[in-house]
Image: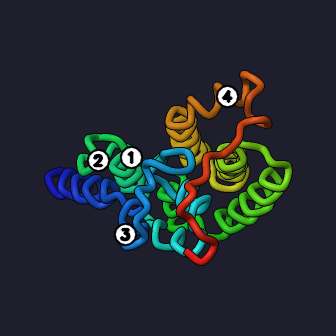
Amino acid sequence: MQAILLRLLVCFAIGSIPFAVISMLGTGIDIRKVGSGNPGFNNVLRVSKGRAVLALIGAMGWLYGFAAVLGHCYSPFLKFNGGKGVATSGGVMLVLYPAWATMALAYFTVARISFGKLKWGEAGTGASLTTWILFTLLMLLFSGHLDASLSLIMTLLLMWRHRANLRRIFGGAGKSRVQRQPSAVHSSH
């Protein structure tokens, strides 16, 4: 039991490292003050595609994966604020079920690009949450009720972290919202 608790603590600690903030070091850009203001992968992607890869971090196992996602979302290094858990949970998805995750992430790519081309201000939220819904359905169909239930819990956690985005979507502002862009950001970042 102590070994499990230690692993959970380590995963929480690793997940709490603000990789989105770290990925922007040397650019003069504080990711928490540009774009959506969220220190997560989608905001780094919005601000600097080249640095977005640095913001990705994976996790191991459902239990350890949850610890990493919670650590990312509630980082003690950022006064228990953090990202919304999308990229970290995507890492969990990839580690646990690479084949199904590849399908879900292919969907994410198409959805993110499509929503972006539609100038939908909540493109990242729409693509991220519907990807987890798709992954949950894949788990239910091909893996079983336990994995589907755990995937659903992860989906609900992500929805909770995106509750302000969901209010904008269901409040009718999702399509018209203008994304904040920093004036100092150049496409070469």
Q: The disc labelled 4 sits on which kind of residue? A: Arg
CA–CA distance in space, label 3 to label 1 = 16 Å
Q: Which mark is residue 78?
A: 2
Q: The disc labelled 3 sits on which kind of residue? A: Leu
Asked whether, in this view, residue 41 is left or right of residue 138, the answer is left
Q: Kindly identify which residue carries mark 4.
A: 168
Image position, residue 171 (x, y; %)? 72, 22
Task: Determine the image quadrant of residue 18.
Answer: bottom left
Asked whether, in this view, residue 32 is left or right of residue 78, the answer is right
Rendered residue at 48%/54% (across/down): 40
Mark 2 in CB contact with mark 1 (< 8 angstroms): yes
**Residue 93 appears in the picture as rendered:** no
Mark 2 in CB contact with mark 4 (< 8 angstroms): no
Instruction: Indicate the secondary structure of the residue bearing disc 2.
Output: helix
Q: Kindly identify which residue carries mark 1.
A: 82
Rendered residue at 65%/30% (across/down): 166
Instruction: Indicate the secondary structure of the residue bearing disc 4.
Output: helix
CA–CA distance in space, label 2 to label 4 = 25 Å
CA–CA distance in space, label 2 to label 3 = 15 Å
Q: Which mark is residue 25?
A: 3
Q: The disc labelled 2 sits on which kind of residue? A: Leu
Task: Judge by depth and name the residue closer to the eye, 135 or 2.
Answer: 135
Mark 3 in CB contact with mark 1 (< 8 angstroms): no
CA–CA distance in space, label 4 to label 3 = 30 Å
Lower position in the chain sequence, tag 2 or tag 3: 3
Q: Which mark is residue 64?
A: none
